[in-house]
C-alpha cells in the first residue's frame, strides 16, 4: 500500500499519471493536485474504470508552502512527484520536509527572474533531508534522468574511468506547426536561448548560444544538425562519474525552429524582463507562451522518432572503451498508448520509475541525491519493462 501525490497536471504529469495507473501494484493510490483542478478531474475521469489505482484530485498552489503542507497532512502521501515547473521545486521540498514525504522531480530549481540552471539551491537541502530520514531524488526525467542512469550503468559495468561523455538529444518528430515547443515553452525557450557551456578539465567553458554545431548520424533516424547547449546534468555528472575530462550536451534543432527563435529573440519576445504594456506589467516570454500551441496538444499531430543517449569514452583494465547507450521512442506509439507525444513520454516514464525505486526501497538513501548516485541496474530493467527500451553499441560514431 502506498500513497503518491503528483503535483502539476500538464504534458509530463499526464504521462506520469497514466504510467502510475498501469503500475497499480506499486501505485495503488494517487492524488493529482495542480493549479487548475479541472485538468486533474478530466484525467481522473478518463482513467477511472481502466485501472485498479484509486485516484483523487485537489487544487493546490505549489508556490504556497502552507497550502502544500495542509494538503500533505490531509492526504498523507509516502512520496510526492513534482511535475509542475522548476519554480516550485523549493516550495515543494519545504513541504516534504515538514511532512516527512519523499520527493522526486525532473528539473532543477530555477528562480523566475534568472535562468541559471544549477543545483546549488537544492543541494543545500541535503542535511535537512538526511536528518529527516527522507529522500529527494533530483532529475528523474530523461535528460536529466535516464542520461544519468546510463552513465552510472556504464561506470558500473564497462569502465574503470570515463573520460569523455557526450549526451545527444535528437527529436526528429514533426508536429506540422512552423514553430512550437515540445514541453513548457517558457522553460524550453529559456534553456535554448541561454549561453551554451560544457565542462573540460574541471572547469566550465562558456559558448555563445548555438555557437557549436555538429552533424550526427543518429541510429534509426539519420543525419541531423545538433548544437551544444548548457544542460543541468553536466554539473552533477562531472562530480559523480569518475575520471571525467570533458562532458558536453547536444540537442538537435531544425532550421525552421532556429529561424523563428532568432526572430523572436531579435524582437525581444523571449525576454524574461517584465515590461510595461498599457499600464500592465507583462513578461514577454510568458506572453509568447500564451500564444504558442500548448505542448500537450501536439500529441495527435507529432510523427517520427526521438533518440536520446550518451556516448562515453574511457578505459577498462587499461584498455580503451567506447560505448553508446540510447533509447529510440516513436511519437505515434506514445500517443496511441497514453495520448502524449514522445517528449512528455520520455520524461514521464522515468519520473514514475524513480518514484517506484523509492517506494519499493530498491533505492533507499535519505538525503538529496542526483539519479546517478543510485544503483542503475533496477532502473535499467524498469526502462525496458515500462516503455523505454535501450540499445547499446561498443563501436559508435564519435562526436569531434
Ligand atoms: P506544463 O506547462 O505542460 O505543465 C506544468 C503543470 O504545472 C501545469 O499543469 C501547471 O498548471 C502546473 N503548475 C504550474 N505552476 C503551478 C503552481 N504554482 N501550483 C500548482 N501547479 C502549477 O509543463 P510540462 O509538463 O511540459 O513540464 C513539467 C516539468 O517537466 C517541467 O519542470 C519541465 O522542466 C520538466 N521537463 C523535464 C524534462 C527532462 O527530461 N528531465 C523534459 C521535459 C520537461 P496549469 O495547468 O494551471 O497551467
Image (spheres, rainbow, N blue to C red):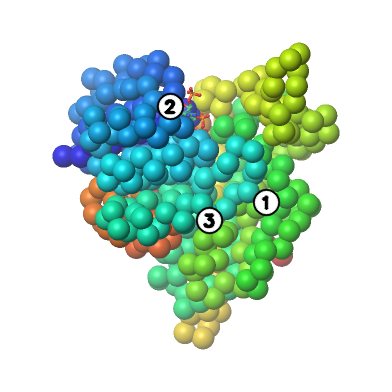
Q: Secondary structure at mark 1?
A: loop
Asked whether mark 2 lies closer than 8 Å to ligand 1, one says yes
Tag 3: Cα neighbours inside 10 Å, few (<14), some, or many (≥20)? few
Q: Position of residue 299 (x, y in %)?
A: 52, 26
Q: Secondary structure at mark 3?
A: helix
Q: Residue at x 43, y 51 (%)?
A: 138
Say which residue label 1 marks.
Answer: 229
Q: Quadrant of the C terminus?
A: bottom right
Dot in front, 3 or 1? 3
Q: Residue at x 46, y 56 (%)?
A: 124
Res. 385 visible in picture: no
Mark 2–mark 3 CB contact (< 8 Å): no
Please tell me which of labels 2 and 1 falls first in the chain: 2
Please tell me which of labels 3 and 1 falls first in the chain: 3
Q: Position of residue 103 (x, y in %)?
A: 35, 45
Q: Residue at x 32, y 58 (%)?
A: 130
Q: Secondary structure at mark 2?
A: loop
**Which of these two is toward me, 170 or 368?**
368
**Which of these two is toward me, 76 or 337?**
76
Numbered circle sitting on residue 67: none
**Which of these two is toward me, 298 or 337?**
298
Say which residue label 2 marks.
Answer: 61
Mark 3–mark 1 CB contact (< 8 Å): no
Asked whether mark 1 lies closer than 8 Å to ligand 1, one says no
Q: Quadrant of the N terminus?
A: top left
Say which residue label 3 marks.
Answer: 120
Q: Position of residue 29 (x, y in %)?
A: 22, 32
Amino acid at each position: 500500500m502506498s500513497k503518491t501525490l503528483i503535483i502539476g497536471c500538464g504534458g509530463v504529469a499526464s504521462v506520469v499519471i497514466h504510467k502510475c495507473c498501469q503500475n497499480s501494484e506499486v501505485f495503488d493510490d494517487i492524488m493529482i493536485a495542480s493549479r487548475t483542478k479541472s485538468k486533474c478531474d478530466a484525467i481522473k475521469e478518463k482513467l477511472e474504470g481502466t485501472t485498479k489505482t484509486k485516484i483523487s484530485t485537489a487544487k493546490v498552489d505549489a508556490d504556497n508552502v502552507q497550502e502544500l503542507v495542509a494538503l500533505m497532512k490531509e492526504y498523507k502521501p509516502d512520496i510526492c512527484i513534482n511535475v509542475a515547473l522548476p519554480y516550485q521545486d523549493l516550495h515543494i521540498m519545504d513541504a516534504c520536509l515538514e511532512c516527512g514525504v519523499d520527493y522526486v522531480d525532473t528539473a532543477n530549481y530555477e528562480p523566475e527572474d534568472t535562468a541559471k540552471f544549477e543545483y546549488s539551491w537544492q543541494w543545500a537541502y541535503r542535511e535537512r533531508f538526511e536528518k529527516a530520514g527522507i529522500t529527494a531524488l533530483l532529475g528523474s526525467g530523461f535528460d536529466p534522468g535516464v542520461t544519468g542512469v546510463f552513465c552510472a550503468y556504464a561506470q558500473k559495468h564497462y569502465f574503470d574511468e570515463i573520460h569523455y561523455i557526450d549526451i545527444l538529444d535528437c527529436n526528429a518528430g514533426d508536429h506540422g506547426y512552423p514553430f512550437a515547443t515540445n514541453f513548457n515553452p517558457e522553460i524550453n525557450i529559456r534553456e535554448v536561448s541561454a549561453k551554451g557551456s560544457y565542462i573540460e578539465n574541471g572547469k566550465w567553458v562558456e559558448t555563445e548560444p548555438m555557437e557549436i554545431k555538429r552533424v550526427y548520424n543518429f541510429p534509426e533516424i539519420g543525419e541531423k544538425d545538433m548544437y551544444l547547449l548548457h544542460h543541468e546534468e553536466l554539473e552533477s555528472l562531472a562530480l559523480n562519474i569518475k575520471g571525467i575530462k570533458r562532458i558536453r550536451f547536444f540537442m538537435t534543432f531544425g532550421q525552421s525552429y532556429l529561424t523563428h527563435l532568432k526572430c523572436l529573440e531579435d524582437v525581444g519576445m523571449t525576454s524574461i524582463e517584465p515590461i510595461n504594456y498599457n499600464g500592465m506589467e507583462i513578461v514577454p516570454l510568458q506572453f509568447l507562451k500564451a500564444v504558442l500551441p500548448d505542448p500537450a496538444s501536439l500529441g495527435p499531430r507529432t510523427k517520427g522518432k526521438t533518440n536520446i543517449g550518451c556516448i562515453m569514452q574511457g578505459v577498462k583494465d587499461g584498455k580503451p572503451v567506447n560505448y553508446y547507450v540510447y533509447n529510440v521512442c516513436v511519437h505515434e506509439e506514445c500517443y496511441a498508448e497514453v495520448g502524449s507525444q514522445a517528449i512528455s513520454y520520455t520524461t514521464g516514464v522515468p519520473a514514475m520509475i524513480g518514484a517506484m525505486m523509492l517506494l519499493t526501497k530498491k533505492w533507499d538513501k535519505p538525503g538529496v541525491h542526483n539519479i546517478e548516485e543510485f544503483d542503475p541496474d533496477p532502473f535499467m530493467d524498469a526502462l525496458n519493462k515500462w516503455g523505454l527500451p535501450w540499445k547499446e553499441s561498443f563501436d559508435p560514431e564519435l562526436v569531434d
